[in-house]
Every structure is written in structure tokens, then in C-alpha cells.
């Protein structure tokens, strides 16, 4: 789903975006002429690799997301996650893809490796 930055209303608008095997749904609204607030939940399944054995495993997602979208480069300091939007177009598919990539790059250990009490040889 794509929407033009300038067409985002100041009152919260509900949205649902399906991408691959996940769904991003929540609300978004304009906070200022250059900032949009997004409050959403990412649900579904994603496949990840175990860092110990390399096996692929599906994980269930139920992540609450809160972030801001900036129309162009954001110069002010903020503790919130800020995603800079190019060309004035908000692409929720791209946001979902980015969140999935972030989750997949995290360290995951499969159930069988968690149950295995054998120590792992470590090299320092």
C-alpha cells in the first residue's frame, strides 16, 4: 500500500497492509507538515535461521510498532524511531519488508538447540 505524504490526514486513519506472510495494521496521522505518527501491530509468521545449527524455523510475530515517518531528511534529535520517506510517497510494503529483514537478522535459537544441554565450543 502506498500513500502520498501530503494526503495523510491529521486525524488518525486506520490501515491494513498484507505483505508476504505478515500483516501490518494500525493507525497513522500527520503530527506536523513533515512528520507522520504510525502506531501499528505486525502479526503473522516469518522463517528464521537458527544461529547454532542453521535449521530454518517459523516464528510467530506479534510486535507492537511505534515510529515516525519524516518527509525527507530528519534533522532534529528524537528518541523515537524515525523513517525517512523519499519522493513524498509512503510505502507500507517497504516498511514491512524492512521490519522482516530486521527480525530475520536477529539471533534466533531453534527449539531443539534450546533443549540440547551440550556445551558449545567457543573461540575467542
Image: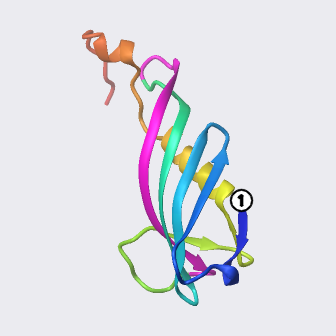
Q: Residue at x 61, y 55 (%)?
A: 16
Q: Is residue 81 magenta?
A: no
Judge whether 52 appears above or below 27 on screen: above
Answer with left or right where residue 109 lies relative to residue 5: left
Q: Nearer the viewer, residue 50 or 19?
A: 19
Asked whether residue 123 is in view, the answer is yes
Q: Residue at x 63, y 79 (%)?
A: 8
Judge whether 25 appears above or below 112 on screen: below
Snapshot quadrant of residue 10: bottom right
Q: Residue at x 33, y 25 (%)?
A: 123
Residues packed near mark 1 inside 10 Å, few (<14), some (14 to 19) or many (20 plus): few
Q: Which residue is mark 1?
A: 1
Please report the bounds of the magenta region as a residue range.
52-73
Q: Which image quarter holds the C terminus?
A: top left
Asked whether residue 36 is in view, the answer is no
Percent position (x, y) of residue 99? 54, 50
Percent position (x, y) of residue 48? 52, 30
Label 1 sits on a secondary structure element that is: loop
Q: Nearer the viewer, residue 73 or 41?
A: 41
Percent position (x, y) of residue 60? 46, 32
Scheme of image coloration: rainbow
Answer with left or right where residue 26 lies relative to residue 3: left
Judge whether 122 appears above or below 11 on screen: above
Percent position (x, y) of residue 104? 52, 38
Q: Residue at x 57, y 86 (%)?
A: 34
Q: Is residue 60 magenta?
A: yes
Tell me the chief SS of the magenta region: strand
Judge whether 115 appears above or below 18 on screen: above
Q: Nearer the viewer, residue 111 or 44?
A: 44
Q: Which image quarter holds the N terminus?
A: bottom right
Amino acid at each position: 500500500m502506498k500513500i502520498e505524504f501530503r494526503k495523510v490526514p491529521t486525524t488518525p486513519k486506520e490501515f491494513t497492509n498484507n505483505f508476504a506472510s505478515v500483516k501490518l495494521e494500525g493507525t497513522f496521522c500527520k503530527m506536523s507538515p513533515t512528520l507522520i505518527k504510525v502506531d501499528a501491530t505486525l502479526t503473522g509468521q516469518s522463517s528464521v535461521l537458527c544461529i547454532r545449527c542453521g535449521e530454518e524455523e517459523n516464528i510467530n510475530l506479534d510486535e507492537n510498532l511505534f515510529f515516525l515517518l519524516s518527509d525527507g531528511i530528519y534533522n532534529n534529535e528524537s528518541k523515537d524511531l524515525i523513517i525517512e520517506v523519499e519522493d513524498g510517497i509512503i510505502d507500507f510494503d517497504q516498511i514491512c519488508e524492512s521490519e522482516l529483514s530486521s527480525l530475520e537478522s536477529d539471533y534466533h535459537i531453534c527449539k531443539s538447540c534450546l533443549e540440547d544441554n551440550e556445551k558449545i565450543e567457543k573461540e575467542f
